[in-house]
C-alpha cells in the first residue's frame, strides 16, 4: 500500500496567470543605450577593458551581454531596435594594434580610434593613495566633461557631438545634484591629437566645520581612544590630522540640500576619486555608413577631388547593383508564391470534384466487357477443346480452393512461412547404418551384412567412427593390404 504523507495541507493549484509587462517610462526609453563588444583576437586584458568600459557606461548598457565567436556585428544591429540601442562600441584587437570603433546605430557614422595606452580599473584603484569605491554611484548616469574640442575642423565637432550623445542629457533646471555621483572627462590635445579618457567619482564634503564634527557628519567612525568623552573629542578636534587639504578652487556654493552636512547656500568642497579605466586614443578615420561607408575623414591619407569623385561613382554603382539584385530576388519570391497558390487551387479543385468524365466511363465499360467474369467452367471447356480430353478435378480446384489470406504473425516472433531446409548430417546416417548392421547380426541372419563379410564384424565391433573415407593405418589387424595402385603398405607391430 502507498504510504500516506504526513503533510495534510492541500496545494492550491490555481490557473497560471501571465505576468504583466510594465512599460518603461519615456525618460528611460529615450535615453541613449549602448552595446560594448569585442572582436578579433582573444586577450584577457582586452576582455577586462571591455567590461570596465561597460561599467563606466552603466546603467544604460547591457552589463551582462554574452558574445561569442559566431556572433557578427549584424546580429547586434538587428537587436538594437528592440532594446533602444543608440550606440555600439567595438574593441577590435589585431596582430598590430587595438582599435575602438564608436558606431551610431543603425546607419552610422562610424568613428575609428587607435588605442595607444590603456589601464584597467583595478590597477587604477590599487595605485590610489585613498581607495574609494561606491557601488551606489553606478545607479545613475555619469556627467560628461569635454575639454579642447572647440578647435577648427568638422571632425572635432562630430567627435564632440558623438561623445555627448552617448550619455543622457541633463536639464539644469530640473536635475538633482544627488544623482551626479560620477563624471567622465574627455580631453583633446591639439598638438599630439590624442584624446585622454578618465573616469571619476564625485564626493561633496562640507567646509567651515570643525574637523571632529566633519568626521561625525560624513559618517566616518572616529577613534576615541585618546579622549574621555565625545565633548572632549569635539573641543580638541584641531589636534586631529587632516590627510587631504582643501583647495579653494574646489569650493562651491550648493543650490540644493545634500546629505552628510551639505546644506543649501553653504560652501562645500568637491573631491574627485579616479576609479578607471584610463584610455589614450587617437582618431584615425570617420566613415559615413555602418563600418563600410564612404570615408569622410582620414588622419594620414589625403585624396584629391578626382579620386574622391571616382570612389563615389564606384560606390553608387555597387549600390545600384545591390538594389537590382534585391529587386530581382523579390520578384522571384513573388513568382514562386503565385505558382504555389495556383497549384494548391488546382489540386483542391480536383479533390473536391469526384465525378468521372464520360470518356473514363466508356473506358471502364469496355474493360469490363473484355474481361468479363472468369470461372472454372470456361477453363475446363478451353482444356477440352485444346486437348480433347476431360481435365483432372485437382487441376482447377487447387487454383481457387486455397485461402490466400496470410496467417497472423505476432510482432517480434521468429516464425517464418518458408519451410525449413532439412539438415544433411552424414555422421548421423552412418551411425544409423551401424546400428542396423549390429541388430541384423544378433538376429543371426548371417551372410553379408551392411559391412560385407561376416569375418569383418570383429574388426568393426563397437561404435563406428566415420573418418571421411580415409583408411586408418593403425589398429586394423596388422598385415599387408593391397591398394588400387599396386603399392604395398606395411603396418608396424609391437613386439
Image: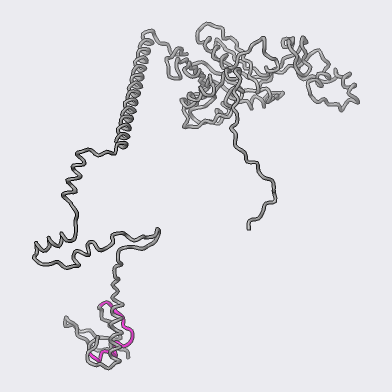
The residue range painted magenta reads 453-468
Main SS, magenta region, reads: loop
In the image, 30 versus 343, the foreground residue is 343
Please state the horizontal and vertical placement of residue 140, each as a whole percent of the image: 65, 20
Quarter of the image that includes the N terminus: bottom right
Q: Is residue 136 visible?
A: yes
Quarter of the image that includes the C terminus: bottom left
Against 199, residue 370 (above or below) is below
221 with respect to 387 (left or right): right
159 with respect to 488 (left or right): right
In the image, 111 versus 119, the foreground residue is 111
The part of the image, by quadrant, that contains residue 442 is bottom left
Against 294, residue 152 (above or below) is above
The part of the image, by quadrant, that contains residue 484 is bottom left
Picture residue at 33% right of the left edge, 84% below the top: 463
Picture residue at 18% right of the left edge, 52% below the top: 372
Q: Is residue 251 visible?
A: no
The part of the image, by quadrant, that contains residue 420 is bottom left
In the image, 163 versus 43, the foreground residue is 163
Picture residue at 22% right of the left edge, 62% below the top: 399
Q: Is residue 464 magenta?
A: yes
Please state the horizontal and vertical placement of residue 410, each as a whole percent of the image: 39, 60
Query: Residue placed farthest to the top in the image?
Result: 152
Please state the horizontal and vertical placement of residue 471, each as a whole percent of the image: 25, 81
In the image, 262 versus 75, the foreground residue is 75
241 with respect to 91 (left or right): right
Q: Is residue 480 magenta?
A: no
Amino acid at each position: 500500500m502507498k504510504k500516506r504523507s504526513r503533510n495534510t495541507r492541500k496545494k492550491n493549484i490555481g490557473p497560471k496567470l501571465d505576468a504583466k509587462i510594465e512599460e518603461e517610462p519615456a525618460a528611460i526609453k529615450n535615453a541613449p543605450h549602448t552595446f560594448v563588444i569585442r572582436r578579433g583576437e582573444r586577450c584577457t586584458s582586452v576582455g577586462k577593458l571591455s567590461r570596465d568600459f561597460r561599467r563606466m557606461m552603466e546603467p544604460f548598457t547591457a552589463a551582462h551581454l554574452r558574445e561569442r565567436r559566431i556572433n557578427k556585428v549584424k546580429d547586434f544591429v538587428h537587436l538594437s531596435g528592440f532594446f533602444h540601442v543608440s550606440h555600439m562600441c567595438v574593441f577590435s584587437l589585431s596582430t598590430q594594434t587595438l582599435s575602438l570603433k564608436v558606431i551610431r546605430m543603425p546607419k552610422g557614422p562610424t568613428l575609428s580610434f587607435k588605442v595607444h595606452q590603456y589601464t584597467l580599473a583595478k590597477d587604477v584603484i590599487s595605485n590610489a593613495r585613498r581607495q574609494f569605491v561606491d557601488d551606489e554611484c553606478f545607479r545613475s548616469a555619469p556627467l560628461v566633461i569635454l575639454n579642447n574640442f572647440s578647435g577648427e575642423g568638422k571632425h572635432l565637432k562630430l567627435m564632440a557631438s558623438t561623445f555627448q550623445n552617448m550619455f543622457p542629457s541633463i536639464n539644469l533646471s530640473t536635475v538633482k545634484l544627488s544623482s551626479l555621483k560620477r563624471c567622465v572627462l574627455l580631453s583633446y590635445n591639439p598638438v599630439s591629437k590624442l584624446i585622454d579618457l578618465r573616469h571619476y567619482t564625485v564626493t561633496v564634503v562640507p567646509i567651515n566645520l570643525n574637523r571632529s564634527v566633519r568626521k561625525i557628519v560624513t559618517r566616518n567612525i572616529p577613534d576615541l581612544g585618546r579622549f574621555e568623552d565625545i565633548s572632549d573629542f569635539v573641543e580638541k578636534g584641531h589636534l586631529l590630522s587632516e590627510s587631504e587639504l582643501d583647495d579653494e578652487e574646489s569650493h562651491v556654493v550648493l543650490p540644493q540640500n545634500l546629505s552628510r552636512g551639505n546644506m543649501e547656500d553653504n560652501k562645500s568642497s568637491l573631491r574627485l576619486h579616479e576609479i578607471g579605466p584610463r584610455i589614450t586614443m587617437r582618431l584615425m578615420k570617420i566613415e559615413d555608413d555602418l563600418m563600410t561607408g564612404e570615408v569622410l575623414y582620414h588622419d594620414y591619407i589625403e585624396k584629391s577631388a578626382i579620386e574622391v569623385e571616382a570612389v563615389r561613382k564606384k560606390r553608387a554603382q555597387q549600390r545600384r547593383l545591390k538594389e537590382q539584385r534585391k529587386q530581382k530576388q523579390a520578384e522571384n519570391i513573388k513568382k514562386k508564391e503565385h505558382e504555389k497558390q495556383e497549384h494548391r487551387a488546382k489540386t483542391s479543385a480536383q479533390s473536391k470534384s469526384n465525378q468521372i468524365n464520360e470518356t473514363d466511363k466508356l473506358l471502364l465499360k469496355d474493360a469490363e466487357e473484355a474481361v468479363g467474369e472468369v470461372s472454372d467452367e470456361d477453363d475446363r471447356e478451353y482444356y477440352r477443346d485444346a486437348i480433347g480430353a476431360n481435365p483432372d478435378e485437382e487441376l482447377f480446384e487447387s487454383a481457387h480452393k486455397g485461402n490466400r489470406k496470410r496467417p497472423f504473425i505476432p510482432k517480434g516472433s521468429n516464425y517464418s512461412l518458408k519451410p525449413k531446409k532439412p539438415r544433411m548430417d552424414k555422421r548421423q546416417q552412418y551411425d544409423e547404418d551401424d546400428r542396423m548392421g549390429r541388430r541384423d547380426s544378433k538376429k543371426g541372419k548371417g551372410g553379408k551384412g551392411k559391412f560385407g563379410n561376416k569375418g569383418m564384424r570383429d574388426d568393426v565391433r563397437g561404435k563406428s567412427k566415420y573418418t571421411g573415407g580415409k583408411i586408418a593405418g593403425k589398429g586394423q589387424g596388422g598385415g599387408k593390404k593391397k591398394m588400387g595402385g599396386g603399392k604395398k603398405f606395411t603396418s608396424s607391430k609391437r613386439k
